[in-house]
């Protein structure tokens, strides 16, 4: 199993947060104003809320692995326990430090 999963590719642009909000049933630690992402990028705090989501959201899979979000154009979920050294280096551009 890979420690990386592409959730949404960059062609969705500014709508990635809205798409995530529509399909994130299993993610935890979301900010209290998270549902406001459903209003789309016209919402005054859309990008601030999204930054909070990226900083705090986690997902624990059925095997107990914790997944985090990372966005650099595309939106990815990654698991520190499952990601290989080579995946990490290719993805983050530096050697794995943990």
Image (cartoon, rainbow, N blue to C red):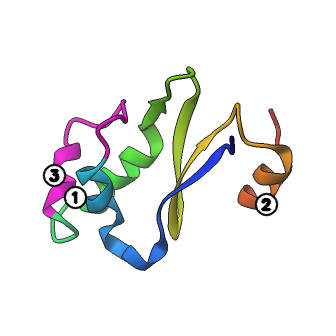
Q: Using residue 38 as the reference point, say whether residue 30 is left or right of it.
A: right
- Crowdedness near tag 2: few (<14), some (14–19) or many (≥20) residues, C-alpha within 10 Å: few
Q: Sequence-wise, which precedes: disc 2 or disc 1?
A: 1
Disc sitting over residue 36 in the figure: 3
Q: Position of residue 46 (x, y in %)?
A: 24, 60
Magenta region: which residues? Answer: 24-39
Residues at discs 1 and 3 in contact (Cβ within 8 Å): yes
Residue on which the image places disc 1? 45
Q: Is residue 69 above or below residue 61?
A: below
Residue drawn at (21%, 55%), measured in percent from left and top? 37
Residue drawn at (21%, 35%), measured in percent from left and top? 32
Residue closer to the observer: 47 or 27: 27
Q: How many numbered circles are shown? A: 3
Quarter assignment of residue 8: bottom left
Residue on which the image places disc 2? 90
Circle 1 SS class:
loop
16 part of magenta stretch: no
Quarter assignment of residue 44: bottom left
Residue closer to the observer: 31 or 60: 60
């Amino acid at each position: 199993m890979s420690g990386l999963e592409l959730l949404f590719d960059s062609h969705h642009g500014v709508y990635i947060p809205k798409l995530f909000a529509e399909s994130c049933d299993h993610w935890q630690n979301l900010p209290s104003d998270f549902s406001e992402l459903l209003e789309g990028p016209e919402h005054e705090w859309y990008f601030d809320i999204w930054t909070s989501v990226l900083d705090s959201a986690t997902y624990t899979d059925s095997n107990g692995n914790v997944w985090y979000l990372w966005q650099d154009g595309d939106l990815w979920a990654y698991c520190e326990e499952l990601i290989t050294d080579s995946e990490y280096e290719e993805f983050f551009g530096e050697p794995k430090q943990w």
